[in-house]
Amino acid sequence: MYPSFRRYDAKDWKRTNFYPWVFILASRVLGLFICLIGLALQNHLICCGHDFDKGPLPNGCRKKILHITYDFYNWLGMLFGGMRSKTIKRDTDYTYYLGPNYKDGYRPIVKTSTIVCNHVSWFDPPVLIL
């Protein structure tokens, strides 16, 4: 019916050639599932005893451990997913537009306010959290 999309090599496919890939894919999916369960359990243990009706976690040891836990499980989930990320910090020279001493009155940037990226896959949230 659609000859331009017809596969003429399907007769040469062997089912046994696909079996090793099934085990690789299944181990990755199982690893991601274990990461999600581990993150949920550790999050529950770290936040045990805190009443979220009164407000969020205050800054302190618990919150720092929670951030480290999220970073670790994001890294582990990306490892199982076969992805990696890299952060590139770029400083652009705007002297042509703003004048030669435009940086003199600025405060140093502690945290980036804008992140520009392509939407690639469902791995975007863990990549942006890292």
Image: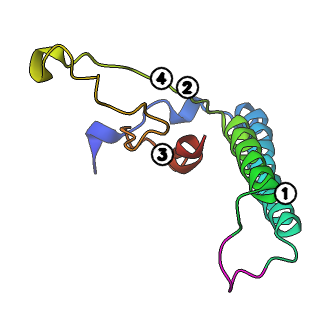
Amino acid carrying mark 3 in the image: Ser
Q: Is residue 75 left or right of residue 47?
A: left
Q: Amino acid at mark 4?
A: Ile
User: Where residue 15 sits in the image (x, y, percent)?
Assistant: 71, 38
Q: Of label 2 and label 1, which has the lower sequence position? A: 1
Q: Residue at x 72, y 35 (%)?
A: 79
Residue 103 percent coordinates (x, y): 28, 23
Nearer-N-terminus badge (1/4): 1
Q: CA distance from mark 2 to mark 1?
A: 25 Å
Q: Three-letter amino acid code at disc 1?
A: Gly
**Quadrant containing the C terminus in the rendered view:** top right
| Residue shown at 37% from the left, 43% from the top | 114
Pointer 1 residue: 38
Look at 52% across and 36% down and name the residue there.
Answer: 10
Residue on which the image places disc 2: 86
Amino acid marked by disc 2: Lys
Please name the residue shown 17% across and 15% down the image. 95
Residue 81 covered by magenta stretch: no
Cβ atoms under marks 3 and 4 closer than 8 Å: no
| Circle 3 residue | 121
> Cα distance, mark 1 to mark 4?
30 Å
Q: What residue span does the magenta drawing correspond to?
A: 51-56
